[in-house]
Amino acid sequence: MITTNLLSVLELAKASLPDSLVDAEGYALLALAAERLPFELATFWGFECRLGEASAKMDILFEIKRQSQGRNILAGEMPSTLDALCAQWPAWKNLRRFATLWANPHHAFSTHIRNLWLEFDTAAIDDPSQADEILSRPCIFFGPNAKTLQKEQDAHLICEALSALENPIYHEDALNALIKELPGEARIFQIGIMLSRPNPGLRVCVYPLTAEEIPVWLRAVGWQGNPENIADILRQLPQGLESFAMNINLMPDGPAEKIGVECYMNWLENDPKQWIPLLDATAAMHLCLPSKYQGILDFQGMTHFPKDWPRPAEGIAYQFLLRKIHHIKLSITSGQAKEAKAYLALSHPGLNANAIFSKNAGGAWLVE
């Protein structure tokens, strides 16, 4: 048997999803999204979990990597379940146009855009009949490639990509003003078009930043809030966090007052206990329920693919499904941390046996 969609992987992860994070109703909503997406679209994806809400629902998101099968499928180079989505809804038509350029080796996107994320707000709906509304308007993120672009080139590439996605709202000058003030090695690592949100602006995500750099940068770019409030919130977080990222919404009159601070730990560390000090801090801020606290820690681990699991293609083996805590984000409004979210990752890279044993494999043995 050949599997055709990502629901097969979600089913494999189901037993490892704590009830406090997703109940039967919440899982059914995740499944509605996963079953509409082809298996080859993503080998790295996951969930967004609101730590302060008792509701056991999560959003679901998928990464499509540069030079991956998923990119080529989104571009329409082979038939898939995406064809129906791209024919039906404007946002998906725009995604196909973008992916066609991205898959063209002669186009700048092919070199300078490293990934694309699609996020579906499945936690926002109460009934499966609303699924099409969520599927039709995903939040779209794309990542400029810091390895191939100079910092001063970022704004031009971003505006080109926004135009390809039919979202040419923001001027290059506004982005350049943000980029000019970035300290040290900090770069824009994701741009988000929040199609499912009212009046969202353009999501600009910057990484890496230190706790000391964040208030300084916000002040320099004309952020509408008080940087001292942010500094106070950051002082409440534990020492030893690996790094921070900033999310701002760029509006026509500048950065919006609501911002997000992403907190990262060591991705290679398999012990979820490294997250306990940060979870303790969110609990002290009254942003994390005890059930969610424990559920986040219980999520991390590894599931081995069963030997009789239906493969998506002959010659490609999937050995394990890795479950990780990716990062925790604080949403800050009016000088206060109002919400904490955990982003949970699933990773299942494949091994192409034909490529491994072929003299002409060209290194393409890892399926992403």
Image (cartoon, helix red, strand yellow):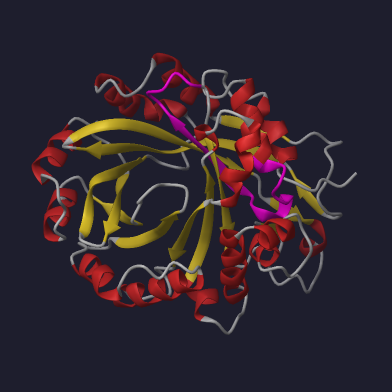
Q: Quadrant of residue 92?
A: bottom right
Residue 29 picture quarter: top right
Q: Is residue 51 magenta?
A: yes
Q: Is residue 16 magenta?
A: no
Q: Which residues are magenta?
A: 33-55
Tell me residue 326's x, y (percent): 46, 40
- Answer with the quarter of the image where residue 120 lies: top right
Q: Is 193 on the left or on the right of 332, as rendered?
A: right
Q: Residue at x 30, y 26 (%)?
A: 282
Image vertical order of residue 127 relative to residue 205, above or below: above
| 27 sits to left or right of 188 | right
Q: Nearer the viewer, residue 106 or 32?
A: 32
Residue at 37% across, 23% down: 52
Q: Residue furthest bottom?
A: 106
Expressed as whole percent of the image width and height from the top left, the position of residue 7 reads 72, 39
Camera-nearest residue between 113 and 127: 127
Q: Residue at x 71, y 44 (%)?
A: 6
- In the picture, measured across the screen, residue 305 lies left or right of residue 277, that is right
| Quadrant in the picture for the C terminus | bottom right
Residue 83 coordinates in the image, percent (x, y): 73, 61
Left or right, residue 209 beside residue 14: left
**Quadrant housing the N terminus:** top right
